[in-house]
Image (cartoon, rainbow, N blue to C red):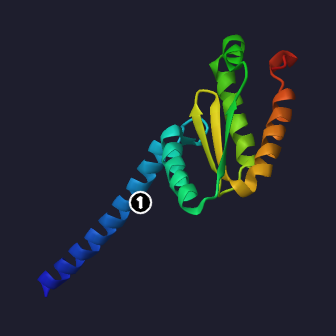
Amino acid sequence: TLQVVGFAFLLVGIRIWRKETKRQTKRLNLLAATDDLTGLYLRRHFQATLKDAFFKAKDTNIPFAILMIDIDNFKIINDQFGHMTGDKVLKEFAQQLRHCVDENEALSRWGGEEFIVMSDAANHHKALIMQKALGIWRSHFLLVNKVKY
């Protein structure tokens, strides 16, 4: 009976270990796919999502929209105010993007100060609204000493 109890503990231990390993793997995959600064998915993740969207669009004949967003003159922000301020701008901008994007839309940091959004064709009008909203955000974004960019 001692062997049976030991075997039962072994099975429970293996089950716990497998569950924890699965959880840690999921966590590590998420860390590898997201940007440390903004918390957005990285380009690699977006490219995989884009590939899936192409196949879906081909099969269903339903198009999708891609919106590429770049922060104009970002180098000037870094040069004049430092990288810490530049990082704050990127974080805030990413946060604003999150508010514009639905859960079913793909949002990623493409690189540097570039971001990319993908949404289905039904959201084409929304993509135009988002583009306009971001333009307004950009035109009203003020930095230290009230310098406008």
Give the residue displayed 34% in from the left and 59% down from the top. 21
Position of 129 relative to 86 (above/below): below
Point 71% across, 50% down: residue: 101
Quadrant (top left/top right/bottom left/bottom right) for the C terminus: top right
Q: Quadrant of residue 108?
A: top right
Circle 1 residue = 23
Q: Please rate how many residues cluster around mark 1, counting C-alpha atoms within 10 Å: few if below 14, some from 14 to 19, many from 20.
A: few
**Quarter of the N terminus within the rendering:** bottom left
Residue located 84% across and 16% down the image: 147
Query: Residue 45 at what x, y percent from top left?
Result: 50, 45
Of residues 96 and 64, the one drawn nearer to the viewer in this rendering: 64
Q: Amino acid at mark 1?
A: Arg
Q: Secondary structure at mark 1?
A: helix
Front residue of 86/15: it is 86
Q: How many marks?
A: 1
Compared with 76, 26 (above or below) is below
Farthest residue, direction bottom: 1
Tell me residue 100's x, y (percent). Answer: 76, 47
Name the quadrant containing residue 17: bottom left
Residue 106, percent from left and from top: 61, 49
Asked if residue 43 is positioned above or below residue 30 in the image, the reply reads above
